[in-house]
Amino acid sequence: MSRFLGPLDSTGRVPPLQQTRIAAFLISAHGALARHLAMALPGQLSAGWQTELNAQFHREMEIVSLLMRATSWVPDFNLPYHALVWEAAWLPKPVAGVTDQRQAMTIDIAALGHAVHGAIRPAAVLPVEAQAQDPFVMALRRIEFESSRMIQPQILFLKSDDLKPMREAVSAAVENRHRQVGKLWAELLEGIGVGRDAETE
């Protein structure tokens, strides 16, 4: 099993089936984050956090749009099953031990976002021989770059003074989401012939 995507075609492009499966997974994850953010926006009383949620929502939608355009899609008859598993995983999970349900949901959104942007490294599975100007390759590299920026506000929120009284519950929520997302990402890679250690290279 390879540590990277491939084998590449003669022009250095990633096989369309691998493109399709990876793009579908990333669209599912980032699309779910966008939906959760859209639902959370009306209930935010803090103007500063509402502004940040709005910015995060638009960035998530941009990632979804980018993948839709950049991917060379092919039929994948296993995709409906995988999509059901992924979508079930992204469902909201209010953080246990937090009495304010709105706050509990916001913490879960931030924890899921932290995991999606931190545990998934799509550019790490690209071989060095991949065509740098290929739209899919450029999309994965841009997503990883954007994720490194988008995770910062989530870190600030999850470590904010407002959440100090519930630090253990917040840490548990982040760990659970990271474990969940990491497992799904590793399973996805294995399903397209990429080894488990690929995302850590």
Image: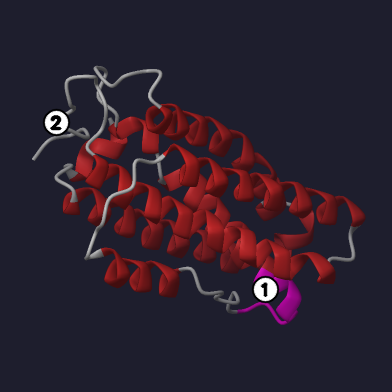
* Figure quadrant of the C terminus: top left
Location of residue 8 with respect to 193 vertically, above or below: above
Q: Which residues are magenta?
A: 97-105
Residue neighbourhood size for the residue with mark 2, other residues' Cα within 10 Å, grouped as few (<14), some (14–19), many (≥20): some
Q: Is residue 100 magenta?
A: yes
Residue lying furthest left: 1
Left of 120 or right of it: where is 173? right
Identified at 48% across, 52% down, the residue is 115
How far separated are the C-alphas under marks 1 and 2? 44 Å
Marker disc for residue 104:
1
Residue 111: percent from left, percent from top: 57, 59
Residue 104: percent from left, percent from top: 67, 73
The kind of secondary structure element at disc 2 is loop
Front of the two marks 1 and 2: 2
Identified at 37% across, 59% down, the residue is 179
Nearer to us in this view, 126 or 80: 80
Marker disc for residue 7:
2
